[in-house]
Each structure stands twice: as structure tokens, then as C-alpha cells.
Amino acid sequence: MTIHETACAKINLDLRICQRREDGYHDLDSMVVFTDFGDRLSFSHDARLTFSIDGPFAKDLLHEPDNLVLKAARLLALSLGRSPDVHIVLNKRLPIASGIGGGSADAAAVLRGLVRLWNVPVTASDLALLAGDLGADVKVCLGSRPVRMTGIGDVLAPFDLPAPLPILLVNPGTPVATPAVFSGLRHMSGARVAEWRAGKSGDFQSYLMENQNDLETPALHAAPIIGEVLTAIGEETGCRLARMSGSGATCFGLFDNPQHLDRAKRRLKADHPDWWILDTVCR
Ligand code: C5P
């Protein structure tokens, strides 16, 4: 038997930092959505824990002796008092260290996939606790639904997107280390002033434009090419919002209609053949 899971990319449509905590982590306030596109994982029974990686970004992970996929499998097995006897294949389609939660989404997919493969009764709250031990963003990736994320990423309030949200993702190929971006943070805008209320807040894109990603400025210092990406997206016809996700370097564009998004994709691909450019839909 083989079980399949998709590890959808996590997009921070905005990301307001509230405060730095004593433990070094930051309280934040972020509207998070997930794309249809993601890494693909498969799980099948094996005598012991075995792992292989393929796909366009596999080579970027090969130097990591112990990535989050293996950690998640071991942690779940340990909590169940069993051996992690599974073969996992990761089809790595998302760029690594890129602000769209690829590693966290993979870890969450491992938790979901192994619960199914091993057919074990693990409650949602137990799974969320394990996710929290694997990283601040793993819990939100478990559900892969639109949420307003607060706390250090552990407090999740679901919201409804007014409609599926077409999005253009652009990554210039420069990995960005999250801790370095957080440590360069100088301005924190605090919790959002107005909550999004579907039907009452007007246009969702306008709502997002009233907010921002506080990590953009420190990420620009760490990787100035992010500025080039944001300008390139923002100059495209019909672009309503060009912004960075997470701690970067992936940026996204929201457009006034699907034709403009498609045109921007084709033009950016022609101008920047070495950038990773993808159009997908957030739900
Ligand atoms: O938990 P995770 O390993 O994904 O976090 C990576 C780094 O991001 C942390 O070491 C910390 O520097 C930073 N971080 C933070 N506040 C958060 C989430 C992450 O400062 N809420």
C-alpha cells in the first residue's frame, strides 16, 4: 500500500510582527493561505526508515543529513512507541529556505501520511503538539487552510477566502535563513488594527494592501535581489499587490484579473529565465 500527500506551499499574505519574546521567538499576526501546488510525498511500508528525494529541488536538500521529514517520522513513531518502519519518497518541487514553508509543509505531510499508513488513532490535538515540536510553522501546515495566525504561529483562527485566490510566485534562487532575517528586524507594526470579515470588509486585496510584511526590510538587507523581484512584479500591468512571503526570498503578485497574471508570468519568465516563477491558486 502506498499513501500520497501533497505538502502545499504556505503563503503569508501579510506578516505583522508584534513583539520579541524572552525565548527569542516573535509574536506575529499573519493571514496565511495555501497553494494548490506543493511538494509530493509518498509513504509505503518498509523494514526500517528509508528516504529518497527526487524532483527539481532535490539537489538542494542532499547536503542536509537529517531534514524535517526524517525528524517528523521519528518523532511520531517515538510518541507511538513503535519503530519508524516506512519508506518515504519526497518529490521536492518547492524551492528550499524560501519563505513558503516547504520544509514545514513536508513535516506536516509526514505526520498526516503516517497516521494514515500506520492506521493509528492520534487525535488532532496530539498531532498539533508534535507539529509544534518540529517548528513554528508546522502546525499551520497540518490543516493547510486559510487562517489568521498569531502567537508564535501556534494560535490559528480559520477564515474564509471570499474566492479562490490566483497568485504568481517568484523566487530568485537565493536561499534566505529565517533566524538572520528576524535578527535584522528593527520595526514591528504590531497586531492588525482591523480584522478581515468576509462580506463586511470589502475587497480582500484592498484589505491586504492596508497591511504589510514586516520582514521585508530585513530580508532586503540580507538578500537585495528581493527588491528587484518586488519591483519586477509590481511593474507588471494589473498588479495590485507585490509582496514577500514569510522571511523570503519568495515574493508573490496578486493581479486584477487572470489574464494580467498570465501575461506577467510569461514576461517575467522571458526576462528572468533563472528565476522560479509559478502561477497557482490559494484556497
Ligand atoms: O521554529 P522554526 O525553526 O521554524 O523557526 C526558525 C527561526 O525563525 C527561529 O529560530 C527564530 O529565529 C525565528 N522565528 C521567530 N519567531 C517566530 C517564528 C520563527 O523569531 N514566531
Image: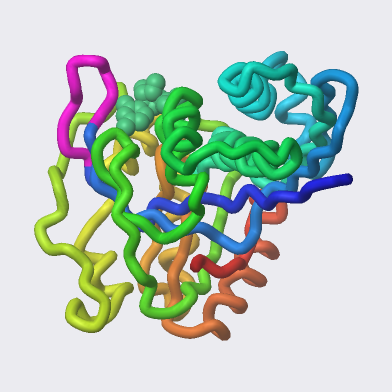
Query: In the image shown, does 252 or 234 lie closer to the viewer?
Result: 252
Residue 282's place in the image compared with 64, above or below, is: below
Residue plotted at (60% across, 78% down): 263
Say which quarter of the image contains residue 184. Answer: top left
| Residue 171: percent from left, percent from top | 57, 48
Q: In the rendered structure, which segment of residues is drawn in magenta?
A: 17-26
Residue 85's place in the image compared with 201, above or below, is: above
Query: In the image shown, does 221 or 199 lie closer to the viewer?
Result: 199
Residue plotted at (72% across, 29% down): 60
The answer to whether residue 151 is left or right of residue 264 is left
| Residue 272: percent from left, percent from top | 65, 55
Q: Where, quadrant-wise, is the N terminus in this rendering?
A: top right
Say which quarter of the image contains residue 50. Answer: top right
Query: In the image shown, does 178 or 111 lie closer to the viewer?
Result: 111
Q: Ligand 1, what quadrant?
A: top left
| Residue 36: percent from left, percent from top | 61, 63
Residue plotted at (46% across, 58% down): 145
Is 214 magenta? The answer is: no
Residue 230's place in the image compared with 59, above or below, is: below
Is 23 magenta? The answer is: yes
Q: Can residue 39 be seen in this view?
A: yes
| Residue 165: percent from left, percent from top | 47, 73
Residue plotted at (71% across, 55% down): 273
